[in-house]
Amino acid sequence: MKMIDNTLLVSLTTYQPLDSKERIFIDFLNQVEGWKTKCKNLHWSAPRKNIHVYLDDFATVLSDYQDGLAEGFMGIHGKLKPNVLKGIGCDHMEANEFIKDVINKTIIFYSKIPQDLIYKGIVSECETFIQNINKYIYLFKLCNTTEY
């Protein structure tokens, strides 16, 4: 009979599954990670300079929001495991469709944030993010984004 490595045994016995509140945040952090990748892909393949610049700016907005959301979450729930972030892909091929996906899924996430007072800072951060998305919806509409 083969012995089990003690470190594996400890990690198997101390594993705690995420509760539903934690799962909401982890899933959305993974969604934002996928958007960051898609945003850079669209940025690098942009057909015009203005789209290229706006996507680069929006990538920073995404990254800053994700960082604030993760740190706010950890202030409430504790540190994230080092393997929790796994980006969820996004198939949109142009900026206007991409930004619509971001606003729609962000609003769904926003509606799932627990109502407990401890989450009000996260609610506020999400509202600011929604405002930023609306700004980029406007900016991308000013661009001709269909020529990829």
Image (spheres, helix red, strand yellow):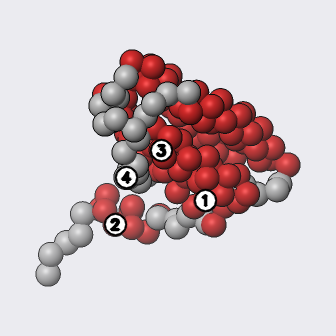
- Mark 4 = which residue? 91
Q: Are marks 1 and 3 in contact (CB under 8 Å)?
A: no
Q: Are marks 1 and 2 in contact (CB under 8 Å)?
A: no
Frontmost of labels 1 and 2 is 1
Q: Earlier in the sequence, mark 4 or mark 2?
A: 2
Residue depicted at 57% across the width and 61% down the height: 23
Q: SS of the residue at dot 1?
A: helix
- Mark 1 = which residue? 24
Image position of 31 (left or right of 45)? right
Disc 1 from disc 4: Cα separation: 22 Å
- How many numbered marks, from 0 up? 4
Q: Earlier in the sequence, mark 1 or mark 3?
A: 1
Disc 2 from disc 3: Cα separation: 43 Å
Residue depicted at 68% across the width and 39% down the height: 130
Which x, y percent locates residue 54? 49, 23
Q: SS of the residue at dot 3?
A: helix
Assess disc 1: are there few (<14), some (14-19) or many (≥20) residues with their C-alpha within 10 Å of its C-alpha.
some
- Mark 2 = which residue? 9
Disc 1 from disc 2: Cα separation: 28 Å
